[in-house]
Amino acid sequence: AKINGRNNYRFYTEDLGVSAKRLHNLYSYLHHAIANNELYLVYQPQFNATNTLIGAEALVRWNNPKLGQVSPDEFIPIAEESGMIHELGEWVIREALDTLVSWKSWLALNPDFKLAVNVSSKQLEHRNLTSYIKNNLSDRGLNAKHVEIEITESLLLEQKTYGMASMDELKEIGVNIAIDDFGTGYSSLSYLATLPLNKLKVDRSFVSGLHTNDTNKKLVETMINLASGLGLNVIAEGVETLDEKHALESLGCTEFQGFLFSKPISAIKFERQYLHKDI
Ligand code: C2E
Ligand code: CA
Ligand code: CA
Ligand code: CA
């Protein structure tokens, strides 16, 4: 921003002061967020074309007594830069798997249900991720087929060899792999073909207003054709209106997630609403 005059300058420096202070607070409070029980997960349902529940995405939330509710868009990057993402990511995995355990009898009757967990590419580079997931699955007697990990496309290309090996190992033990925010990175067809993927998740930016945007329609159609050529499922995220859902369906998309169906909700609400359990 252009700074002209005393007043503007004053506001500018005050803004900087506030954000530096906030950043400092975020760093120091995030360190204790797990120990202080400030993190929790919410779950957003996913549906197929006939409105059958096919899965859910687990999304982390942080409620700090001083800062209030902090968005993951703000604290995940901080966790990644500070290295806290490993501890945080492991907490997310344990918590998501504990939720799956509480749904075990329901899962037995719904063998195709998948719970998607967001995994940072930093975690993927960490040597212990696969064994961590594997051990936590077996400790709980859970089948890996109920777990999906979402990896953001734009960070995929940064993967070094170990990230690739992690994906192969996860696929090997039966964990599903989805590419998140698909269309926002620049993955080539030949690169995608080398990855052990199950699913492409079309980014919300292409879904929003899809029915009135011919460019986005063409792009989404291309993504869907690409996925089908690679034998992958496609899910659209951020579906907010019926118009968007219908446009997606006409392009061949068969899986949906978004506020049209439900915002992310607590495990208890999710159970009551979708699993018909009354605990
Ligand atoms: P994401 O993985 O792309 O998650 C989708 C985001 O879109 C979520 O925001 C979700 O609440 C929001 N959303 C879902 N449906 C709609 C819709 O119809 N319209 C609109 N406008 N938004 C919708 P949220 O929960 O704030 O998460 C933001 C990002 O933070 C996530 O983007 C993901 O990158 C990251 N994140 C969240 N939880 C975790 C986690 O456990 N681990 C890691 N590494 N990252 C996470
Ligand atoms: Ca995601
Ligand atoms: Ca996404
Ligand atoms: Ca995103």
Image (cartoon, rainbow, N blue to C red):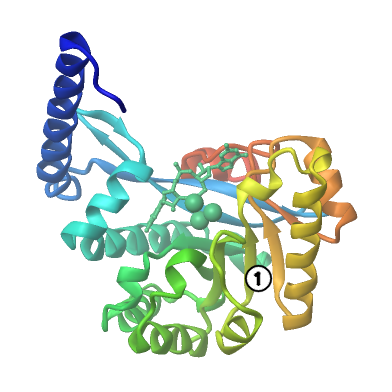
> Residue 30, relative to residue 4: is it above or below?
below
Tell me if I can see residue 151 in this picture.
Answer: no
Residue occupied by mark 1: 111
Identity of the amino acid at label 1? Pro
Measured as percent of width and height from the top left, residue 90 is found at 28, 65
The crowd level at tag 1 (other Cα within 10 Å; few <14, some 14-19, many 20+) is few
Q: Residue at x 53, y 41 (%)?
A: 264
Q: Residue at x 11, y 39 (%)?
A: 24
> Residue 43, relative to residue 129: is it above or below?
above
- 69 or 194: which is nearer to us? 194
Tell me if I can see residue 21 in this picture.
Answer: yes
Quadrant of the rendering where the N terminus is positioned? top left
> Residue 230, relative to residue 73: is it above or below?
below
Measured as percent of width and height from the top left, residue 147 is found at 51, 70
Spot the residue most to the top: 7
Q: Secondary structure at mark 1?
A: loop
Q: Quadrant of residue 177?
A: bottom right
Q: Quadrant of residue 195?
A: bottom right
Please indicate whether residue 267 sits to the left or right of residue 221 in the image.
Answer: left
